[in-house]
Amino acid sequence: MTVKTRFAPSPTGRMHVGNLRTALYSFLIAKHAGGNFMLRIEDTDQERFVEGAVDIIYRTLDKAGLTIDEGPDKDGGAGPYVQSERQALGIYMDYAKKLIEQGNAYYCFCSKERLESLKTVVAGKEISQYDKHCLHLSKEEIEEKLAAGVPYVIRLNVPAEGTTTFHDDIYGDISVENRELDDMILIKSDGFPTYNFANVVDDHTMGITHVVRGNEYLSSSPKYNLLYEAFGWEVPTYVHCPLITDENHAKLSKRSGHSSFEDLLELGLIPEAIVNYVALLGWSPEDNEEILSLDELIQKFDYKKINKSPAVFDMTKLRWMNGEYIKRMDEDEYLLKALPIIEKTVTKVADKKALADLAQSRIETFNDIPELLGFFEEVPEYEVSLYTHKKMKTTPELSLTVLQKVLPLIEGAEDFSNDALYAMLVGFAGQNGFKNGQVMWPIRTAVSGKAQTPGGATQLMELLGREESCARIRAAIGKLEREA
């Protein structure tokens, strides 16, 4: 048997992290087994359709490296791959009518008012279970209503007795009393199939062997089995994935600002790191290795090791992982991403590559660059308490003395390179009875206005140049004198 999986998103906007994980796990299951990965667009819910969302789906899959073997733009013989196009061919209606002929489904002409009257409240929750009223209509009554154009839906005729058992490869067997199941709608009044019905028909007719989805669909799963049994079809392997929560163990929502793939890209994260991290939301390799390329994920992925418990989306962990990817980037790829941001952030330093080199091991996302390097453009407002360093026994008063004495040396330095400046300042410290840190700390503070910088005092001065460095030191002297 050739393994065939599918990713079947609805075009309703940006791709949620949960949907990305579904796509990724489906891709990994197929590729690990040497099988096929298919894309199907589920657009039967026309009210939720968002213009341009199909493009987002394609763009996300492309950036994530999840290459499809067949789909709307790559016919593999199982098309159409868009549900509205399949609906237009009458595929779903044909199968629904087959179920009616077998007695497994029936027309329902009940009005909204009647359906509303069936609703009850149990434990504070409103529930509605259809009472099979229209199941008992005669053939003549049905034909009369159809001829008169009375609106209808088609419902599944769930057995009133017995149980339905559903098997999931992660959660095992799940059994439900049939009397607890509603006669779910298969075809809506607009002629479109419901999500559940279209899924079953499409998965079977398109040859899907493994279905991956979130565990919120577990409760619907017994109904799928009833459909498979009614048609006499083989049930695919189902893999339900655990819920993804935020750090507070609440469902990851749009309000978090990082719930979708595109949100994460806008935060300066790179696709490879996102995919790597999302793969670990509910699964981990046996060797517990965390930094894994897509090829390594394909090799190591075993869907039977997916966890049942919720997976926590830890933004701190993702940022760390992204930083590891940035550190390991080859120079050309890194510069391609870093230089445009650096050029917008810093105009006063000519050697942009040197700035990029400073940043590479110190950022976790590319959006960290402006915060890290912004002081090269302009010294931020800072308190003179920044000149205090207890370990070095440095104070604002001592810093003022050091800066006043060292400024003429810096102004007159013939060689303004890092090494030459360092040697000069170390010599100055020794000659004047200062520790090296008591000289370097005030200078670094003066030229940066920051407690932490990507580089030491002389590195920063070399990049800033003589004129800018001296101007900043003079400004610092003035600040210290005013606040003395």
Image (spheres, rainbow, N blue to C red):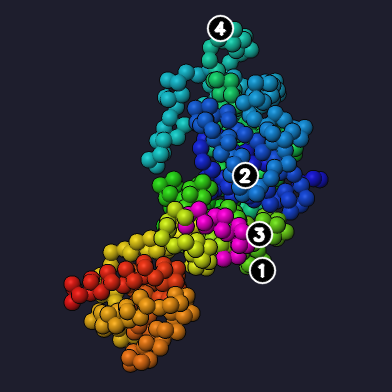
Which residue type does callout 1 highlight?
Answer: Asp
Up-down: is 66 above or below 307?
above
Report the residue marked by disc 4: 148
Up-down: is 314 above or below 444?
above
Cβ atoms at labels 2 and 3 below 8 Å apart:
no
Q: Residue at x 65, y 21 (%)?
A: 88
Q: Nearer the viewer, residue 3 or 337?
A: 337
Mark 2 nearby-residue class (10 Å; few <14, some 14–19, many ≥20): some
Q: Nearer the viewer, residue 241 or 355?
A: 355
Report the residue marked by disc 3: 293
Quadrant containing the C terminus in the rendered view: bottom left
Which residue type does callout 4 highlight?
Answer: Ala
Q: Give me the C-alpha separation between circle 4 and circle 2.
A: 47 Å
Which residue type does callout 2 highlight?
Answer: Leu
201 in the magenta segment: no
The reply, left or right, for residue 241 in relation to residue 441 is right
Report the residue marked by disc 1: 287
Up-down: is 197 above or below 123?
above
Q: Give me the C-alpha separation between circle 3 and circle 4.
A: 61 Å
Q: Residue at x 62, y 52 (%)?
A: 171
Q: Magenta stretch?
A: 327-342
329 in the magenta segment: yes
Q: Nearer the viewer, residue 437 or 212?
A: 437
Q: Nearer the viewer, residue 162 or 32?
A: 32
Which of labels 1 and 3 is toward the front?
3
**Helix, strand or loop under label 4:** loop
Which of labels 4 and 2 is toward the front?
2
